[in-house]
Each structure stands twice: as structure tokens, then as C-alpha cells.
Image (cartoon, helix red, strand yellow):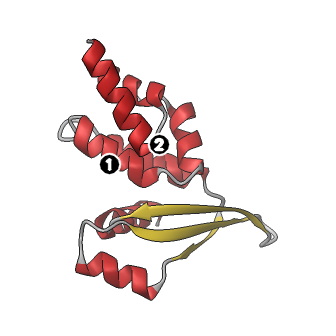
């Protein structure tokens, strides 16, 4: 058990994600939404999707979809997504490459209220866009 905890701590430290939220997910198969949302606000969506893919049984849970939905729900109604053509080309050329994407949140008067820098693979980016539409 101690090795499992040490390993999980190492993984979460390497990814930069919240240890307790990862522990809840891996041990109890539940989302600690409050802690995960804080990580998502800091742009750690790719890191959470990586954790889910590599360290949970993503074949029987829908955690990837749930985390993407949490991210989308935290965005304002007016959003602009900036993905440079160069980053998109890299994402197309290497399906495992996580491109740098900037998400701009605007209020209802079109004033910038926050900027979130995220990374996603092309497949994750397409999934996110489909869920948000």
C-alpha cells in the first residue's frame, strides 16, 4: 500500500494534478469535482486526461468525458479558442503531440475575464469541440 501511495504521489507530482482528487478517482472511481476544477482552471486538462488514460480503467468509466464537461462548464458563454496553424500541423502530423491552445473567456460585454492555456492532442481537441457545440 505504501508503494501505491508513493507511486500515486509521484505521478500526480509529475503531472501537476491534485493528489487527493487523483486518489479519489483511482480508489473510489469518483470525481472530486472541486479539486479537479481548480486544476482545470490552471490549464491541466491534458494532464488529467493523461492520468485517466494511464492510471484508471478508462474502458469502464467515463471520466475523460466528465473532466472535459467540467472544463466546458467552467467556461463563460463567450469563448475564443486560439490554435495556431503551426500547432495544428504538429497535432495532425503526430497524433500524440499535445498542442498548445489558448482559451479566452469573455463576459457578456465582450471583456476578457480569463485566459487558460491548455494542451490537447488532436483527438482530445476534436472531442472537446464536439462536446462544447
Q: Image point 34% across, 40% down: which residue?
A: 63
Mark 2 — residue?
A: 16
Q: Nearer the viewer, residue 31 or 39?
A: 39
Which quadrant of the view contains residue 117? Answer: bottom right
Which quadrant of the view contains residue 9? Answer: top left
Percent across and percent down for residue 25 are 36, 28
Q: Does residue 67 appear to the left or right of 26 in the view shown?
A: right
Q: Secondary structure at mark 2?
A: loop
Is 89 drawn above or below residue 43 in the view shown?
Answer: below
Q: Does residue 67 appear to the left or right of 52 in the view shown?
A: right
Q: Quadrant of the N terminus?
A: top left
Q: Nearer the viewer, residue 96 or 57?
A: 96
Percent across and percent down for residue 53 are 25, 45
> Is residue 32 something one can see in this rendering?
yes
Mark 1 — residue?
A: 50
Are dots 2 and 1 in contact, CB under 8 Å?
A: no
Percent across and percent down for residue 77 are 65, 62
If you read the primary sequence from the N terminus, does the residue marked by circle 2 or circle 1 appear first?
Answer: 2
Q: Secondary structure at mark 1?
A: helix
Q: Image point 53% across, 48% down: which residue?
A: 40
**Mark 2 nearby-residue class (10 Å; few <14, some 14–19, many ≥20):** some
Which quadrant of the view contains residue 85? Answer: bottom left
Amino acid at each position: 500500500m505504501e508503494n501505491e501511495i508513493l507511486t500515486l504521489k509521484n505521478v500526480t507530482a509529475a503531472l501537476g494534478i491534485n493528489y487527493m482528487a487523483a486518489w479519489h478517482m483511482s480508489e473510489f472511481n469518483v470525481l472530486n469535482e472541486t479539486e479537479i476544477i481548480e486544476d482545470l482552471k490552471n490549464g491541466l486538462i491534458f494532464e488529467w486526461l493523461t492520468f485517466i488514460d494511464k492510471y484508471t480503467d478508462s474502458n469502464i468509466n467515463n471520466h475523460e468525458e466528465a473532466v472535459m464537461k467540467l472544463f466546458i462548464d467552467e467556461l463563460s458563454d463567450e469563448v475564443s479558442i486560439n490554435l495556431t496553424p503551426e500547432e495544428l500541423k504538429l497535432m495532425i502530423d503526430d497524433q500524440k503531440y499535445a498542442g498548445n491552445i489558448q482559451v479566452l473567456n469573455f463576459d457578456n460585454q465582450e471583456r476578457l475575464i480569463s485566459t487558460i492555456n491548455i494542451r490537447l492532442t488532436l483527438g482530445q481537441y476534436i472531442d472537446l469541440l464536439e462536446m462544447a457545440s
